[in-house]
Image (tube, rainbow, N blue to C red):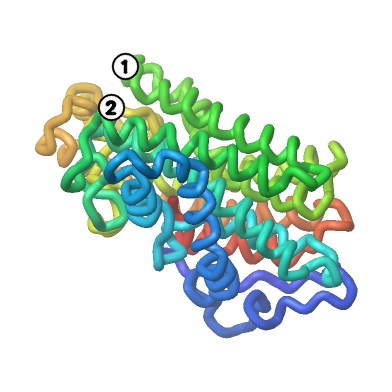
Amino acid sequence: MLRLRCLIKSNLLRKNRSLSERKTLSSAAPPDRHEFFKNEMNDLNEFYPLIAEDLTKYISHYKEFPGLLEKFPVLIDYTVPNDDPYFLTTALIPLYTYKAVEEPDKLTRDNLRKACMMAWVYRILEVSQIIVDDIMDDSDTRYNKPTWFKTPGVTMESAILDSHYLATGGYLLLMRRLADHPCCLPITDLYMENMFMTFVTQFMDTQNVGVKEYVRLVPLVLNKALYIFDGSVRAGLYLANISDPETHEAIKKYTVPMSRFYQLTNDMNGVFQDESKFQRHCPDILWGRNCWLVATALKLANPAQKKIIEEHYGNGKMESAMLVKEVYRELKLDQVHAERTVEFVKEMHDVVEKLPKRIPKQPFHDLVQQLAMNNLYS
């Protein structure tokens, strides 16, 4: 990954706010994901047992049914938490954002508990979608272990039901735990909208529109990851009672490009990064999904290279996927991505500086850097 120069610390930080314990950049190498999200990981881990307990409590009146109460804690513990922040983006960013924008005197333990609950719910909703996604792809692994529907004792049918349990349970938990918060409904609506749009974009993956349509349609496909930043960041604003439409429209100028670049980088990872981190090597090539890589390759390819892509992309054969991957290497798409990353960081610096005055700038600069360093995954 191309080494990025540290971003200049903003002079517009909120008065009396100190982020130096984990977020301040210097001329030294920027913090890795473990150090950067250390405090958020500690917070999430502290309150996680309460979340799992609540989800199980909702079905406690069925305790006489054999094995029921024992099943769901296993489901939650297997699919939701993770020791590596790399895999917890959708839980970390809502909490990170809330702590960055909330007034210091309101960062009480009770409010922190609510923030962690809200963050874990978003992760739970994502997991409900991931379970189905793995079934559709017939994936063997996820997060360096077997996918949920391929673990011993779990059938495909029960995994689908488990997905629904997590989704409905997550919304139930959100509505009950934030019932007295003025922005409970906007947060719930935001989460539902982002999950809905994720399923819509996943539908696009199931449709074989043909390689020749990829360049035209790729902007729509990049919206697949809008939930990563749009839902996460704006939920943090809502929890801090920042609910005016003007601020939320302004923050979208940050969350939308961040989400799209995240998806672009995710496409890259599936081909050029360590295979052990991902559920399958070259999944987009194998299954014929439209993505930034193939659309860019089609723009840059010569006639012979374009013919290889058109003949071998998406036929499910690994040998064909390797031929397409070789075209990517010939076109130096990893270098194209590295150059785009540098441009992206510069563009986002300007975007952050133009955010409303009430939004502290440095935390959002730092998040751009973490994304550019490929430290965020889901």
- Residue 46 vertical position relative to residue 87 in the rendered view, above or below: below
Q: Residue 62's spot in the image, x, y percent?
A: 41, 39
Camera-nearest residue between 119 and 101: 119
- Residue 203 vertical position relative to residue 286 in the rendered view, above or below: above
User: Mark 2 near mark 1, Cβ–Cβ under 8 Å?
Assistant: yes
Left or right of 85? Residue 254 is: right
Q: Residue at x 33, y 29 (%)?
A: 289
SS at mark 2? loop
Q: Amino acid at mark 2?
A: Gly
Q: How many numbered discs, if any?
A: 2
Residue at mark 2: 288
Q: Residue at x 17, y 25 (%)?
A: 315
Residue 2, by quadrant, is bottom left
Residue 66, by quadrant, is top left
Q: Residue 290's spot in the image, x, y percent?
A: 37, 28
Q: Which mark is residue 208?
A: 1
- Residue 362 vertical position relative to residue 305 in the rendered view, above or below: below
Camera-nearest residue between 151 and 247: 151
Q: Is residue 215 visible?
A: yes
Q: Could you tell which of marks 2 and 1 lies nearer the N-terminus?
A: 1
How far apart in space, not on screen, are marks 2 and 1 (Cα)?
A: 7 Å
- Residue 106 vertical position relative to residue 64 in the rendered view, above or below: below
Left or right of 179? Residue 68 is: left
Q: Residue at x 62, y 37 (%)?
A: 191
SS at mark 1? loop
Q: Residue 60's spot in the image, x, y percent?
A: 46, 45
The quarter of the picture where the N terminus appears is bottom left
Q: Residue 97's spot in the image, x, y percent?
A: 69, 58
Camera-nearest residue between 243 and 7: 243
Left or right of 211? Residue 255 is: right
Q: Residue at x 56, y 59 (%)?
A: 92
Q: Amino acid at mark 1?
A: Asn
